[in-house]
Amino acid sequence: MTEAAMNASEPGKPILSLRNITKKFGAVSALTDIDLDIHAGEVVALVGDNGAGKSTLIKVLAGVHQPTSGTIEFDGREVTLNNPATALDMGIATVFQDLALCENLDVVANLFLGHELSPYRLDEVQMEVRAWTLLRELAARIPSVREPIASLSGGQRQTVAIARSLLLSPKIIMLDEPTAALGVAQTAEVLNLIERVRDRGLGVIVISHNMEDVRAVSDRIVVLRLGRNNGIFTPETSNHELVAAITGATENAVSRRQIRKSAQDHAPEQRP
Amino acid sequence: MSNKEAGALDRGDVRVRHQEGMIDAFWSFVDRVRSGDLGMLPVVVGLVLISIVFSSLNPVFLAPNNLVNLLFDCATVGVISLGIVCVLMLGEIDLSVGSMSGFASALVGVLWVNSGWPVVGAILVAIAAGMAVGLLYAFLYNRLGMPSFIASLSGLLAILGMQLYILGPTGSINLPYASPLVSFGQILIMPAWLSHTLALLPGLVLVVTGLATMRHRRAAGLTAAPVTLLIVKAAALTALLEFGVYYLNLGRGVPWMFGFFVLLVVALNYALTRTKWGRSMFAVGGNREAARRSGINVRRIYTSAFVLCSTLAAVGGILSASRLATSSQQAGTGDVNLNAIAAAVIGGTSLFGGRGSAYSALLGIIVIQAISNGLTLLNLSSSLRYMITGGVLAIAVIVDSLARRSRVSHGRG
């Protein structure tokens, strides 16, 4: 490990820090002056309503979009993420919401895509061994690594996508809605996976709409609203406060619904 | 499952059926075909049908010397088809390969015969022209977002125009018969001993690399395919090839030009299956965005495919000039384009991208040329030949789409 990486692992010093990140798509400002710090060994949840800019922020960090202005510091150095390959090489791995796997290729090929061992004479055996080892470390249940991705279930694909992001030993891993499409058991598996990854000393960014999942794994909860920072919370924060930060008002659809519900519960039985 | 393999790294899950012996291997083949992974099956069925039909109509069809001629003809369009495999793999198309081959053959004729260049120089210029056209398509596709279908359709006309322009009013240039280029395309045959030795090679390579992989896998704690299966495969392949070579040697023998074509096929097959570039080709063809996000330079992959396709089309054009001993206005027109595309599709390369192999060009072109050769032997007019070849292409594409639908419903991508 390089000296820079050692320093970054010290508590208190962030691996990744964003300052004043702004991203404009034409007239629309998707992100405005976003600040964000990620430390090693912590899980940061990124929450916000639809259109709050969570996915845009992830894509900026993954090198898919380039910010209009602002600085990104990685390992204490200012960096420019021009394309996905730069971000990957630097140690920022991403699991996208749509997973981005090639259905026509098998699990091994997908895990090593773009980073195959010995490019002029692919070392299939070594790649298969590392694939199995990695999947075992994650306690993943994949029936066969030589089947095309098309034959796997949603949870298994999610596992493959997470395993792929870990393959290059990144320092930061970002997961966009990792549990959105999953059942109860698979969700628990993925949350376990996130904790295991954190315990390996990686910084983890999780996007989720599910407050229960967010509270279960995160150390800090960063709220975005309409492309701006709208507060940093701890998992102990009450649901009411979080929802207020996400929607931007104490008086919102969620609170109104709650008031109506409780009013109904307390109201005397009116039907005959 | 034997005790030794129970602890293997890839045998942790009890839900998966693993193939352990010959019988399992057979059933897993049946499973694959049923789920729409047809592989080489349509080609084999097609060849058997074609042989039965044509040899019953005209016994000359299966005569050794007719088959030797067939192989000569296969090499020219086959090389073009090899390039088509590359672009189809990405889900793109090049409709101008026929014109490109005609232009390349015209360039060789004009530069070599009319302008007195050395033949090697003329060939190099023709190949460079192919590369330039490929680069142009790549630029139109990558930078201007022009669909390859349209880009190459306009290329078809433009390149045909260039071919007619450089050939001038005479329209046809005869290449000197005594030259090495023409004898390569018409008479050069491998000595019998050499062709027999070369026919041994694939089986030998199969066994040697297969055993090495097995040892490697066992050492790494993975299970390996059974040895018997490997031996049977290699023996069957060797027997088939040796019989083919023996039969061809009853006639004139194996053409050098066909040997050159097979060499290109083997090289491309290695590149597609065993290198990072090939893996990227499959990935881009399967899911372009996923490939981009995993750090693959997608534009470079497209460029490589377009350049390879046009370059191989130029090589095919040079071969056909040497085969016909002429560079004419007719070179590369007519059914050359569609034959090249049909061959790749019949051989099992999908029009939808992400699926195919270099061998599909080899096997597909044998089917296409066998049909065209058989129809010629029956003295059918070219009108009927076109209709029948068109029908065969339609059937091939239908098989491809149906197989794809079946693959999707069986979860095989």
Image (tube, coloured by chain):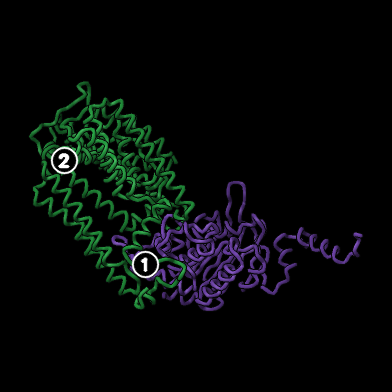
Residue A119 percent across, percent down from the top left = 32, 61
Quadrant into which the C terminus of chain A falls: bottom right
Q: Is residue B93 left or right of residue A173?
A: left
Q: Which residue is mark 2?
A: B68
Residue A174 percent across, percent down from the top left = 53, 65
Q: Which shade is chain B?
A: green
Q: Is residue B263 left or right of residue B253?
A: right
Alpha-carbon neighbours of circle 2 within 10 Å: few (<14), some, or many (≥20)? many
Residue A81 percent across, percent down from the top left = 48, 59
Quadrant into which the N terminus of chain A falls: bottom left
The residue lying at 53 percent from left, 59 percent from top is A96
Judged from the image, the secondary structure of the residue bearing numbered disc 2 is helix
Query: Does A34 appear above or below B336?
Result: below
Question: Disc 2 is attached to a residue of which chain?
Answer: B
Q: Quadrant of residue B200?
A: bottom left
Judged from the image, the secondary structure of the residue bearing numbered disc 1 is helix
The residue lying at 37 percent from left, 32 percent from top is B154
* Residue type at numbered disc 1: Met
Q: Which shade is chain A?
A: purple
Q: Nearer the viewer, residue A83 or A204?
A: A204
Q: Quadrant of residue B57?
A: top left
Residue A16 percent across, percent down from the top left = 53, 68
Question: Disc 1 is attached to a residue of which chain?
Answer: A
Query: Does A238 appear above or below A21?
Result: below
Report the residue that reaches farthest toward the top: B169
Label 2, label 1: how many angstroms apart (C-alpha)? 44 Å
Q: Nearer the viewer, residue A10 or B410?
A: B410
- Does any portion of residue A84 appear in the rendered image? no
Numbered tag placed on residue A24 in the rendering:
none
User: Of tags 2 and 1, which is closer to the observer?
Assistant: 2
Q: Which residue is mark 1?
A: A127
* Residue type at numbered disc 2: Val
